[in-house]
Every structure is written in structure tokens, then in C-alpha cells.
Image: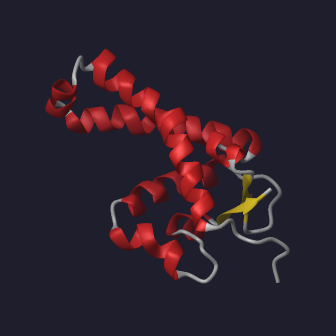
Amino acid sequence: MPSYSIAPFTQRFKAFVVDSFMLLMPILYIVFYLIYGSREGFAAHMLQGWLLILIPYGALTLLFLKRNAQTPGYKAYDLVLIDLSGKQKLSLLQLLARYLFMLLTAFTIIGLFLPLLRKDNLALYDILSQTAPIPK
């Protein structure tokens, strides 16, 4: 029996919104307007544009999670990411796998709503990477 409880979906969603505004929005602005000059320029080079967005966002997220197991959104809502396999620290490979699995599950409807259907509230990317967000 685990000695922790998984953070509620609503708290994790709110943390995601905070991360989107604090981390993702500046990257979007830089890519849209400083690199491509406009949204139309971005639309003309969409694959390259999304790579220019997702790679820095992933790097920032990994940096925050590796440093103290919290992104700015997790910190705002007193959440921390733990390793379910029993290790003390999250490995960089595990965090990278979690981010890649998160991108894959974001493209599927069931992947987005899986935490609402599961009793333990874990997302598919948390299950696959053996991580879990818990209240601090």
C-alpha cells in the first residue's frame, strides 16, 4: 500500500495551465513573431515551427523537473513529481520518456481523459514512465 496519494486531476490541470502561460506562451511568442515574423509565417513552416516550440518547452520542463521535481505550475499548486518504482530521484531518461509519452497521449482523446476514468487518477504518460504527481 503506497504512503502517498496521487494529486487530483483538477490540481494537475491548473498546474498545466500555469506552466502553459509561464513557459509555453513566451516560447510561442518568440517562434511566431521573432523567428517567423507572423502567424502566417509559422503556418507556412508548421512542422519546423512546432519543433522549435516543443523542443525548448520540453527542455525547460525537464530542467525544472530534474532540479526539484516541480515545474512552476507544480510549485504554485504544491505538487511534486515522484518515481513510482521506488528510486529517490527521477532520472533524466525517465523524465524524457515522460515528456515524449505526454506528447503522444496529447494527440489521442482517450489519452487526455484517461486520468478521469482511472481510480488512481494516473495519466497514461505517468503509467508508462512510472511517475506520479503527488501533493507536497
Q: Quadrant of the N terminus?
A: bottom right
Protein image colouring: secondary structure
* Closer to us: 71 or 90: 71
Residue at x 29%, y 19% (from the top left corner): 33
Q: Is residue 41 left or right of residue 31?
A: left
The quadrant holding residue 119 is: bottom right
The vertical placement of 121 against 14, above or below, is: below
Residue at x 38%, y 21% (from the top left corner): 30
The vertical placement of 38 against 95, above or below, is: above
* Closer to us: 95 or 118: 118
Please provide percent x and percent y for residue 106. 39, 59
Please provide percent x and percent y for residue 104. 39, 59
Residue at x 58%, y 66% (from the top left corner): 9
The quadrant holding residue 40 is: top left
The quadrant holding residue 85 is: bottom right
Judge whether residue 96 can be spotted in this image.
no
Q: Is residue 33 left or right of residue 94?
A: left
Residue at x 66%, y 38% (from the top left corner): 64
Please provide percent x and percent y for residue 57. 48, 37
